[in-house]
Image: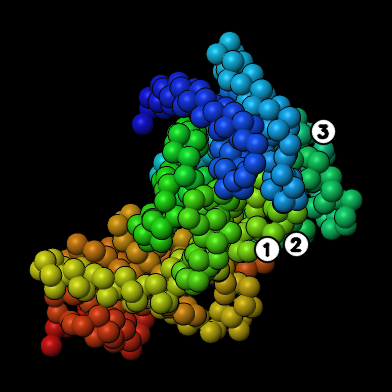
């Protein structure tokens, strides 16, 4: 949907709401008139209906440009809430005053134009597309080792001297060694790289040095001697901030116009949303949409927000998803009670569009990071063992159903124990991440690669013949064997062995994986640093 389309729909929604608001105020005024005309037998249910109507206006009017009306409705709602809780019947003059105030609000609506509502700002602007992440390294002295290591991880890494300008080649990240470059020089150079995220290297590990890094706007801080694997892991986390897939938000609110406004506002900020107005439809919405975040209104007919939150938490599949209440409830004690019942946060209506986008983005980003951490290997960022086995089962089932061919590849780093024994486990982790990054880069987008355990990897290649799979893995094997790995001041080379099996030759999925594993073992027995194909029985 184009921005112009979103703005047009928001404008139409605003006009629709203004009409509904007038009708709602008329209805509430009539209800207040009826209450004030009664001399006896005041019905508490009528007070509750009137309070709920005011609550709805208090939570929505400000969003559509009527902030004063929202505040007035909130004050009237709170007065009615006090009356209901005290169980003391309001006097006729009190009800008459409420009627007059509602009547005045309705009259004011006819003479007041809705105020403009601030629109959300644009989101992140970082490296995009398939080009490598660009990293500039600024340090007086030898930077070859660091640049070589980061280049091996797949980054486009270049040295930035005091004289060299990077205005044409704009880096995504600038790594500055503050122990080797004076602050005036590197701060001046950062002005030429306005989009670059800053990472500082330092000899000083104290609090003051770290605090200054924060004040300099740094996105990372590392002490000498630099742990390159840790630095690379931090870089990977930074450049993954802009998600390729938009965040997904489920909005549960019985006020359709308001919920649709929220949906369009989030859509304009690149966030996908789905609206559910009936709480009983939420479980189906969770299964179909699989959101990163759920926004829940507190006051809904038939099921309150806290009740719905507790119901959602019955299912372990949704424990990781933040449940955020979005309600006109401003009483801190009631907010605390709601949060105590399975909620994670509380946003108060009316909420500005920019505030909604900022709050949703921050919480959805954290939810996405947690989901990735649970589903992916912490060292490599690749799919974990259980998930990759499930993908193998899916491809095997698809192959049996359609007759199409897919391949599974088992990969194992050669003589990995000697790497750990010679250079240490930190260097071993570095080699594992190096291969993981190469596999991510060289395989297709439709392919899946996971860390099976230790130094073993599994790749699933859909719609791929046995020969094409062997050729692809062979190209990666050769490239990996030519990379120079760095350990302190030493460099060395590493190889891997691989086995490939086809879904057309091996069934079920467990037999397919075992066939690839045996072929990989044959490659090891045959001298290592080679790819073997599993021969059909």
Callout 3: helix, strand or loop?
A: helix
Instruction: Write down the residue under mark 2.
Output: 225
Is 193 located above or below residue 231 in the figure? above
Judge by depth and name the residue closer to the eye, 373 or 477: 373
Is 398 located above or below residue 142 in the figure? below
Instruction: Kindly check if marks 1 and 2 are in contact, taking CB atoms under 8 A apart as contact.
Output: no
Judge by depth and name the residue closer to the eye, 168 or 1: 1
The dot on residue 184 is: 3
In this view, which residue lies farthest toward the top?
A: 111
The quarter of the displayed image where residue 508 is located: bottom left
Q: Could you tell me how many numbered marks the image carries? A: 3
Is 406 located above or below residue 131 in the figure? below
Instruction: Write down the residue under mark 1.
Output: 340
Q: Nearer the viewer, mark 1 or mark 2?
A: 1
Q: Position of residue 27 (x, y in %)?
A: 51, 29
Circle 3 crowding by C-alpha within 10 Å: few under 14, some 14–19, many from 20: few
Q: Earlier in the sequence, mark 1 or mark 2?
A: 2
The quarter of the displayed image where residue 526 is located: bottom left
Callout 2: helix, strand or loop?
A: loop
Q: Position of residue 184 (x, y in %)?
A: 82, 33
Query: In this view of the protein, can residue 417 be seen by the observer?
Result: yes
Cα separation, mark 1 vs mark 2, equals 46 Å
Q: Residue at x 50, y 57 (%)?
A: 303
Q: Earlier in the sequence, mark 2 or mark 3?
A: 3
Instruction: Kindly check if marks 3 and 1 are in contact, taking CB atoms under 8 A apart as contact.
Output: no
Q: Residue at x 88, y 57 (%)?
A: 206
């Amino acid at each position: 949907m184009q921005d112009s389309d979103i703005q047009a729909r928001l404008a139409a929604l605003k006009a629709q709401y203004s009409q509904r608001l007038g009708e709602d105020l008329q209805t509430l005024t009539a209800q207040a008139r009826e209450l004030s005309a009664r001399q006896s037998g005041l019905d508490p249910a009528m007070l509750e209906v009137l309070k709920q109507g005011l609550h709805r206006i208090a939570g929505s009017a400000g969003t559509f440009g009527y902030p004063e009306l929202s505040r007035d409705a909130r004050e009237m709602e709170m007065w009615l809430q006090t009356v209901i809780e005290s169980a003391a019947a309001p006097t006729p003059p009190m009800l008459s005053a409420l009627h007059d105030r509602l009547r005045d609000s309705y009259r004011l609506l006819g003479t007041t134009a809705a105020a403009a509502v601030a629109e959300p700002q644009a989101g992140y602007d970082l490296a995009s597309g398939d080009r490598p992440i660009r990293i500039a390294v600024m340090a007086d002295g030898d930077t070859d080792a660091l640049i070589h290591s980061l280049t091996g991880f797949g980054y486009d890494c270049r040295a930035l001297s005091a004289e060299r300008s990077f205005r044409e080649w704009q880096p995504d990240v600038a790594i500055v060694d503050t122990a080797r470059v004076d602050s005036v020089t590197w701060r001046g150079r950062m002005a030429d790289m306005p989009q670059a995220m800053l990472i500082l290297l330092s000899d000083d590990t104290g609090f003051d040095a770290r605090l200054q890094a924060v004040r300099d706007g740094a996105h990372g801080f590392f002490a000498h001697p630099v742990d390159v694997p840790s630095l690379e892991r931090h870089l990977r986390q930074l450049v993954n901030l802009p998600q390729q897939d938009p965040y997904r938000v489920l909005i549960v609110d019985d006020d359709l116009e308001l919920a649709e406004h929220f949906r369009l506002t989030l859509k304009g900020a690149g966030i996908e949303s789905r609206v559910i107005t009936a709480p009983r439809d939420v479980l189906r919405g969770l299964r179909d949409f699989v959101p990163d975040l759920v926004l829940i209104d507190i006051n809904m007919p038939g099921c309150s927000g806290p009740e719905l939150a507790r119901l959602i938490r019955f299912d372990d599949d949704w424990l990781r998803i933040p449940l955020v209440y979005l309600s006109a409830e401003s009483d801190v004690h009631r907010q605390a009670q709601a949060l105590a019942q399975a909620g994670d946060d509380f946003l108060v209506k009316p909420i500005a569009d920019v505030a909604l986008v900022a709050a949703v983005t921050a919480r959805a980003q954290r939810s996405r990071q947690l989901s990735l951490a649970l589903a992916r290997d912490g060292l490599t960022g690749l799919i974990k063992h259980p998930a990759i086995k499930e993908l193998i089962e899916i491809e095997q089932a698809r192959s049996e159903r359609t007759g199409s061919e897919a391949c599974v590849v088992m990969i194992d780093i050669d003589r990995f124990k000697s790497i750990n024994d010679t250079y240490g486990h930190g260097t071993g982790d570095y080699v594992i991440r190096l291969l993981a990054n190469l596999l991510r880069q060289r395989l297709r987008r439709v392919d899946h690669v996971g860390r099976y355990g230790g130094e073993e990897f599994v790749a699933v290649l859909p719609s791929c013949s046995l020969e094409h799979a062997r050729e692809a893995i062979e190209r990666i094997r050769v490239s990996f064997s030519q990379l120079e790995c760095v350990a302190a001041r030493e460099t060395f080379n590493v190889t891997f062995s691989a086995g490939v099996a086809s879904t057309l030759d091996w069934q079920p999925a467990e037999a397919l994986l075992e066939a690839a594993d045996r072929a990989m073992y044959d490659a090891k027995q045959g001298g290592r640093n080679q790819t073997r194909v599993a021969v059909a029985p």
